[in-house]
Amino acid sequence: MKADINTIARECGVSKATVSRVFTGRASVSTPVKERILKIARELNYAPQQVAAREVIAIIVESLDRIGCYDVFRNILLTNLVGEIVRAGFLVNIIEARDIDKILDSYTKTAVILLNDVEALKYKEKLNNMKIPLIAVGNILDNCHSICSDYYGEIALAIDYLVKNGHSKISIVVDNADIRAGRERQRGYTETMKKHGLSPMASYDYHPEKQSLIELMAIMIQDAPTATIICGESISNEAVYALNLLGVKVPEDLSVISFEKQKSSRWFSPPHTTIDQNVLKIVTESMILIKKILAAHLKEKIHKRLSCSLVIRNSVKNMNIK
């Protein structure tokens, strides 16, 4: 028989309220006490009453306080994942990465990780020590299944389209060059430009702590590209504003391909041609993987890089037409 909250409290020499606070997070508990409660809970196969009867899918985020400050893409992923997990009949437990040790194997069946590789590195030891299957969504992490976009391929797709429309001097603005997605996009840019016999331009990496986006865009404009790819849903609105302030007309002066934002991209002036990462496809594939994990133990890690598509609108000038 599984232990109940009274057993845990008695074994740890604390009150039931203290045990409850550890699992609900409604009030702080000292680290030594918390660690002892979690240790005893694991040893006794304890599951909190409110979740013991249903399977739980954990979603690991960097910080609950920063959810609204995450990049737009991860916020969209999180919202859709929660909806689909609940719709499938599971409970969702959103956990901060620093509290990974609150995840008990006795009732959590798998954990979805919404951390980029830089964030995940800070918690590498804790993640490696977890006994349940882990799924990195939107990224590729060690010791995890993974579902993410083909970051290299999406940039190759955009460059191919621009070259088809007569562009040869193409730049790329990357919203976070320090993470895997940013590095893969830069690699896709450099290698695809060379494939077409074109010279890659300088790297325009956005670091908000170092310079504003308008400053970065001004530097890029001085190098006179005929087209640019603006990487990341989080910076597309600000990039449009920056180009307006700089007096750059799209697509007359500069052709632009940005990343699809359903509530923004088609309302830009002009409407932007975009790279669509297809969030619904990523979430659907994630749910398929979750159900496979719950149905049977997967002996090999599954890694899927999903192709993207271009949404063609009016922000790319055809240079072939005189």
Image (tube, grey):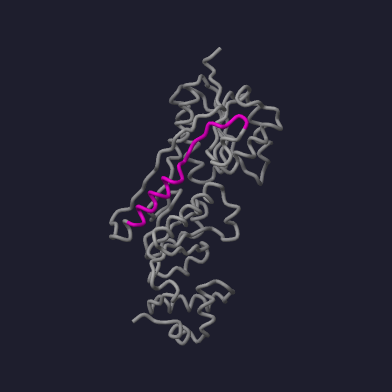
**Horizontal and vertical percent position of residue 153:** 43, 35
Q: Is residue 217 left or right of residue 9?
A: right
User: What span is in magenta?
Assistant: 269-291
In the picture shown, does residue 15 fall above or below 292? below
**Horizontal and vertical percent position of residue 5:** 45, 82
Using the image as rendered, state which of residue 259 and residue 91 is in the foreground.
91
Is residue 205 magenta-colored?
Answer: no
- Residue at 39% x, 69% y: name it: 54
**Horizontal and vertical percent position of residue 41:** 43, 77
User: Which quadrant: the N terminus?
Assistant: bottom left
Image quarter of residue 48? bottom left
Using the image as rendered, state which of residue 263 and residue 125 is in the foreground.
263
User: Which quadrant: the C terminus?
Assistant: top right
- Residue at 35% x, 52% y: name it: 288
Is residue 287 magenta-colored?
Answer: yes
In the picture shown, does residue 293 fall above or below 199? below
- Residue at 55% x, 74% y: name it: 31
